Amino acid sequence: MRVAVLTATLGVVLAASALNLVLGGLWVAGVVSLTLWRRRMPSAAWLVLVLTLAAATAFSRLGWLTAPAARSYEADELAWLGAGLWGPAPPARTAESDFESRRAALRARLARRRQMEFRVTGRELGERAALAIAVSREIGRLRDRAPAEVAGVEHAARRLALTLTAPEFRDLDGRATRLAEWFADLDAHFTAARDAADLDTAARALEAPAMAAVSLGALREDLARVDAASAALVRALAGQSVGVTAAGRLEYAEARGELVVEDRYAFTAPPPVRITRLDVRPLRKAAIGAGSSMGTVQTLAYGLGTSELRELGGENAIAVETGVARVMVVDRRTRPVTPVPIRAVLRPIPFHRLGVPSDDGSPAEFPIRVALGEAPGVEAGLQLAVGPRRLEETRLPGYAFHDASLPGTLTRDGAHDVWAPADSQRAAAPAADLRLELVPPNRLLRNRAFARLAPYLYVPNLTVTLALVGLVALTSILTRRRGRPALPPAGSEPGR
């Protein structure tokens, strides 16, 4: 019996050590310390065991033995101890690192400006401008219902027409080509810069006055005025605006090595306004920009009103001649993904980190055309801005979830772990650098028992401390040698 209990105790210690060497090291240190103490006090092991059991009972009634808060697998006990004793180490700063940081910041600013300028091509800007001018010619029939708003649309359209007749905006494609060359030269200047003065010179070329000769900003501003005036007209006619909501969900198909990102866009128009055309080119362009080098496969589907979803082929727009009050668009992107192994210094088994793509590639706005009331042929073009995509849930293989870089809740749905960000983080999750840490695909680790024990194994906590102390005391008791029987005094007769 004694051998069996000792074997079981050592088995538990070895299993814990295989998962986290810190636990095995603490057990060895505890056994050595208790052995030395037992030389002075033979009953020390029993005293420690009794006190440990009493403390465990008391702390359990007080509710102190709950699971610790989750923490990244990379944050081991040594880092936790060092941060607690000396605080986090400040990052080393040098003149060279400051220079490189500024260079990186300017290049990021250049990338944002390039993305803003080329989010819509010159040809698409021309199409929007032509539609806006055409709408302004037909919209006069609504003057008796919304005179101020109709006048606002007509005024904005006239300003747009004046911009288009300016010599510098007659060739939009040529202007876009010169703008691309401007950005390429700036990028080369940032790369070749050797000091702060070089960076300052190149940075001034990113300012609006310096880019006025090549930027498409003036045309975009005029189109934005037309869009704002058209949106005001819709609100005057219907009492509210045309709206869009965006929600996303993720699924990690581990067997196929794929990450599936599904975004749902719901477009609604208040009566008597109806949606007659929805341009989905922003979704196609976003998929190309976000996954051109990652093998992304995109599938688009749509539903009109309450009808079932149907797949959208190669069309760039959803057109409804009679108009509809609601359009649902589902953008499903599948791309290969390889989790990155992560480990801590004293944890032999590597876990995995799954990087979730942000919504930087998601469209910021959709071109949409709406019919304004019952008058035939009276339509308005809008650029419908999309708010932050709300991440609803992330589906992972069963018992695979370990930790996330954002607060959230975990539920288990059959063979899947379903992690959802907290309500306050749903809009921030897609935009943030969301990272999910996964338990390695091993049946010994992906099970209900390990899922319950994992929080205790990798975060310092009172429960494991008491368990280790108890195992140290039990080991000391079981390995203690029994005293030999005393020898009879010399010269005495046996049996007397």
Image (tube, grey):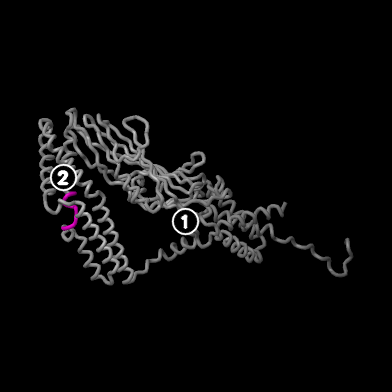
Residue 14 falls in which quadrant of the image?
Answer: bottom right
Frontmost residue, 94 versus 368:
368
- The reply to whether the magenta stretch includes residue 476 is no
Tell me the SS state at disc 1. Answer: strand
> Which residue bears the numbered disc 1?
340
Task: Tell me if residue 250 comes above or below residue 6 in the rendering.
Answer: above
- Which contiguous range is marked in magenta? 213-220
Queried whether the magenta region covers residue 215, the answer comes back as: yes
The numbered mark, 2 or 1, whose residue comes first in the sequence reads: 2
Q: Report the amino acid beneath label 2.
A: Arg
Nearest the viewer among 36 and 211 is: 211
Residue in view at x 21 percent, y 61 percent: 206
Mark seen at residue 225:
2
| Mark 2: secondary structure | helix
Residue 21 higher or lower than 409, as above or below: below
Q: Is residue 213 left or right of residue 100?
A: left
